[in-house]
Image (tube, rainbow, N blue to C red):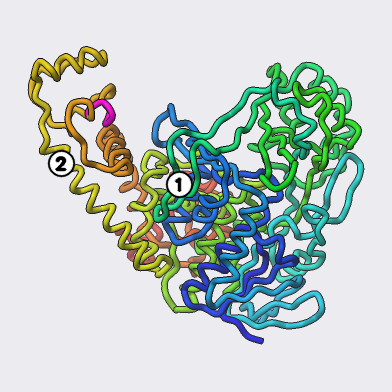
Amino acid sequence: MKYEIIVVGGGHAGIEASHIAAFKGHKTLLITMNKKNIGDMPCNPSIGGTAKGIIVREIDALGGIMGRIADISHFQIKMLNNSKGPAVRSLRAQADKTTYPKNMQNELENTPNLSILESTVEDLIIDGETVKGVILANGEKIYADAVILTTGTYLKANILIGAENTPSGPHGEARSNHLSDNLKKYGFTIQRLKTGTPQRIKASSIDFSKMTPEYGDDTYWTFSFDNPPAYKINEQQKCYLIYTNENTHKIILDNLDKSAMYGGYVTGVGPRYCPSIEDKLVRFKDKERHQLFLEPESLYYDEWYLQGFSTSMPRDIQERMVHSLSGLENAVISKYAYAIEYDAIDPLQIMPSLETKVIKNLFTAGQINGTSGYEEAAGQGLIAGINASLKLEKKEPLILKRNDAYIGVLIDDLVTKGTAEPYRMLTSRAEFRLILRHDNADLRLREYAHKVGSITNKQYQNYLDRVTKLKEGEAYLQETKCKITPEVKEIFIENQKEVPNATESLYNLLKRPEITMNFLEKIVENPLDNQTKEELEIQIKYEGYIKKTYKEVEKMKKLEEKIIPQDIDYKKVKNLASEARQKLEKIRPISVGQAARISGVNPSDIAILSVYLKKEYGKDE
């Protein structure tokens, strides 16, 4: 049997990879161990979050489906950091763990050119240095022109609860026993990583009266740029906030040696930015309490997720830990927390296109690349699917730069710096975050999507219509004047705003920090829609900062445009520091810009490299 593209794994990376490859017209096969687990959410019941919500918007702008499915599958949504600057605002939705996977499975089952096979891949078919297909656990061979590995946490996975070590994938599912060993045989460097998940609590055993409710926003939001909201604001479900206490901390610290992590049972490296509760107590000894959230997992079953209480303690200690929390004194634990360790590859062995350097036409995406999180996985899966398709079409890959998208930052960090722990996207990782916002993901990425054929004509037209509205809206704000009549002056005074000395355009008034679109509507009728108002207000208020950011982008672009030939022999580049030479040889950056971001490569090394490129290749543009 022959396909154009085979995707291995039905998690969030595999979904996006297989869907976009099939959408682009390629005969695609998605191989997953269990069809029912397609779109599964083995950890938190949410889509989005700080920085992650922007990734979901970028996925939607590029033609992915995570945002669209989240929009029809959630029961609460809110904008995080809404009181802060626009650079750090992100959507987070509480997705129903029953509805979300069902909607994803339905989407894939109805995608033309896509077939789904329930099986386990244990090896690859390799011809020379090129992948030609996969070998199933039963020995069957399936051929393809390109293969995308999105294996999640299933490679030689172990579940750890205290001293217990169970060979298993999430939820007690079967694991992949041989694929990572075979990847090592082909030349991949394999690393051991760890993540974890907290307890699930029976709702009927929770005393919510002792907790602080957390509500969804009273503003309609969507991840998708193309579809209207599919929920009712007043029907959103509540979450709840609680805190750890002195007794909780004592139980944990007194039993630290029983934890799989601190008892020496864990070999994998855990995520620094999503630590277990015992890790938090050890690392942040000065904190008297840590906040936890209780979140409903689904409207169809009676389990709540205890966000922030991930642990690998034995079950009896977990009982005491949970019962020490206010409102959970009589809690019934339906699923105990556990740590899971698994194999991943060294991401320095993949290219910015997500094709591996070791084997041609083999792409990897998601946790196999060392990342953590549904959104990071989905973003990579989408890029891998697009680039596998483009390679078969004999076209240049889509490589997003750090000023294009958080997805670009994510991939560049992986392939340039590598990671020794599960990588999680943070706003602080993006140096150009002021222009990588929630509101403008389509303006940044839809032209790319149209060029590579990953969106429909209707989606592209929606984008063009939005650009037109923004141009017309900006013209309206510049042309419309605010005359300071006695009535207008009174409105300024009543709202404690400084009264302008003379007639001003609405555009210039918006440059003032205290003036908002909502305030201006008290003076002049505003015909703009909410999305256009939001976008223009941000662009106008932060105009100076945005221009400054783009100047920095231009500096970076000049270095990115200095391409480094991949056949370069770094041994011939005289006077390079030995560490720089080793790093450059290992990573083999595609541009001087990427080389400059490699840890251990200093500005003096970049200057030497630039001189060598000019002399040997005439590259000085």
Q: Residue at x 42, y 56 (%)?
A: 61
- Observer-nearest residue: 618 or 71? 71
| Sequence-first disc among 2 and 1 | 1
Let me know if residue 384 is in the magenta part: no
In the structure shown, which secondary structural element does the residue marked by tag 2 occupy? helix
The picture places residue 154, in percent across and down from the top left corner, at 75, 59
Residue type at numbered disc 2: Tyr
- Magenta stretch bounds: 516-520
In the structure shown, which secondary structural element does the residue marked by tag 1 occupy? loop
Q: Quadrant of residue 549?
A: top left
Residue linked to disc 1: 222
The picture places residue 462, in percent across and down from the top left corner, at 32, 58
Q: Is residue 469 left or right of residue 318?
A: left
The picture places residue 239, in percent across and down from the top left corner, at 63, 33
Let me know if residue 517 is in the magenta part: yes
Q: Is residue 307 left or right of residue 529?
A: right
Residue linked to disc 2: 476
- Observer-nearest residue: 473 or 163? 473
Q: Residue at x 43, y 59 (%)?
A: 62
